[in-house]
Image (cartoon, rainbow, N blue to C red):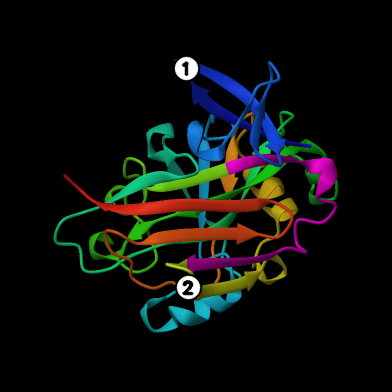
Amino acid sequence: MKSARVAHGGAVHHAAPHERGVRLADGRVLAEEAVVWLPPVEAGAIIALGLNYADHVKELSRELTVTSRDEPLVFFKTPGALVGHRGETPRPAGAAFMHYECELAVVIGRPARRVKARHALAHVAGYTVCNDYAVRDYLENWYRPNLRVKNRDRATAIGPWLVSADEVPDPQALALRTFVNGEVKQQGHTSNMVHSVAELIEYLSSFMTLAPGDVILTGTPEGVVNVNAGDEVVCEIDGIGRLVNHVVAEP
């Protein structure tokens, strides 16, 4: 099952896919552009992973002092960082290098505490697409993201659909890609994650309780390039969805 959250007519609605756009819970069918797309879940904790694809570690190897099997690089984001499908993400004035990051986002459905990897996927409600922008100018160093890089308002696009876990039998069997103005710039596969979804849940739940609505952003593969105001960035994950975002100049 696929579900979304949209705003229309001054109210928030749950929506499902329809051949003409979206179908609201009350039965109305609206064009995709007639609604404001919200993040598909009301997120609790947003837990993000850095350097979780082997090819991306290799891509940045000249700047890194970590190995591919170090403990996961984890950081937190706040809900204000999120923006929905078809939303706009500001590019800071004067930034030299801002790039997209196409990521599989995992939404927790059942509390998880000290869960072993073999049982971890039973705690997942579903999956969605994320585009987690980074402004590389603001990095304190090349492998420990700081707040200005990763917790910027509206810099984490997510959606459009939450795809229930029963429709994704293996989250490590998904191809993903990013288009900038219609041109493919990034391609990867979740099988190339350093730490799988199940391993991440085991690791995180070993020291904290994962709650329903918590979101885990699982990292991005190689192929990140600079984007500018006016660019359209589309992230796709097979079977999960197609997330559209527009980069705008920061006021």
Is disc 1 in contact with disc 2, using a CB cutoff of under 8 Å? no
Residue 9 is labelled as 1
- In this view, 101 is above or below 46: below
Q: Position of residue 122 (x, y in %)?
A: 82, 39
Q: Position of residue 29 (x, y in %)?
A: 65, 28
Residue 170 part of the magenta-drawn span: yes
Question: What is the magenta range?
Answer: 160-179
Looking at the picture, which amino acid does disc 1 mark?
Gly
Q: Is residue 25 visible?
A: yes
Of residues 56 and 80, the one drawn nearer to the viewer in this rendering: 80
Of residues 221 and 206, the one drawn nearer to the viewer in this rendering: 221
Circle 1 crowding by C-alpha within 10 Å: few under 14, some 14–19, many from 20: few
- Quick one: SS at disc 2? loop
Q: Which residue is mark 2?
A: 66
Residue 183 placement, left or right of 250 = right
Extreme bottom residue here?
62
Residue 158 part of the magenta-drawn span: no
Which of labels 1 and 2 is toward the front?
1
Looking at the picture, which amino acid does disc 2 mark?
Val
Residue 148 placement, left or right of 112 = left
Q: Position of residue 39 (x, y in %)?
A: 52, 35
**N-term mark: 1 or 2:** 1
Position of the N terminus by quadrant: top right
Residue 209 placement, left or right of 77 = right
The residue lying at 28 percent from left, 62 percent from top is 139
